[in-house]
Image (cartoon, grey):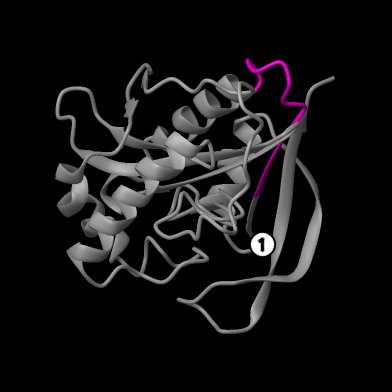
Amino acid sequence: MLNRNDIAARGCARCEHGAGLAADPRDAMRHEAGTADPPEVMALDRTRLRRPRLSDADAIFEFGCDPEVARYADWPVCTTIDSVVEIIRLRREQWSAGIEFSWIITLPAEDQAIGSVSCRVQQHAADFGYVLNRRYWRNGYATEVSRAVVEWVFSVPSILRLSATCDTENIASVRVLEKSGLSREGIMRRSIVRPQISNEPRDAFLYSKVRE
């Protein structure tokens, strides 16, 4: 899992918040009006990204309540469908407000949620993260989705930097980030709590890509 705090391939990679299943809009990063105009749909080679729908709640709950998927996440596992519905509604509001842009990951033939990815933009910088149902791990989907987000971010002229983080033990997320063109900047010592592992903050790798 890779976040924006850790949402990646085997659960999460985020770029230290996690494609997250939970976020407080008061803590989210805002982009300047007119800076980014995200596509509502991205048709990729093997996957398709689209905005979340309330009808996705059951499928999101399937991976959102899985402790193995959320092992390296910075959010607790989902416990009820109602909480997922609230998150979907929040994601709609965040998109409209320009706080955070979230997409559901689907397979074109099925159009069922198998994961999610989101990106936040603040002035010249962005970060992103994703989560993927473990039934779909090891297929290269996380890398394809991450590359698409990276490509979109750097299609916006005003964005100069994209970053992401992952737990130092999350090797799958490390591979996804590096395959997506990000480079390791360093280690953030004792920086992120992973609720499924410990209440103590853990070390995280910081990855980034900058416009040259």
Tell me residue 15's x, y (percent).
61, 48
Residue 205: give x, y in percent of width and height: 71, 56
Q: Measuring 20% from the left and 64% from the top, which residue is drawn there?
A: 82
| Residue 159 part of the magenta segment | yes
Q: Quadrant of residue 120?
A: top right
Q: Secondary structure at mark 1?
A: loop
Would residue 123 be found to the left or right of residue 128 on screen? right
Question: 84 above or below 95?
Answer: below
Q: Is residue 24 visible?
A: yes
Q: Is residue 10 magenta?
A: no
Q: Quadrant of the C terminus?
A: top right
| Res. 62 image quadrant | bottom left
177 lies left or right of 140: right
- Quadrant in which residue 187 is drawn: bottom right
Packing grade of label 1 (10 A; few <14, some 14-19, many >=20) is some
Note whether residue 133 is visible.
no
Residue 35 placement (x, y as % from top left): 64, 23
Q: Residue at x 45, y 76 (%)?
A: 196
In the depicted structure, whether residue 100 falls above or below residue 23: above
Magenta stretch, overall SS = loop
Q: Which residue is mark 1?
A: 168
Q: Residue at x 39, y 57 (%)?
A: 21
| Residue depicted at x 39% and y 43% | 93
Vertical relation: 51 (above or below) 59: above
Which stretch did the figure color magenta? 154-164
Left or right, 11 with respect to 88, comes to right
Q: Nearer the viewer, residue 41 or 45?
A: 41
Q: Amino acid at mark 1?
A: Thr
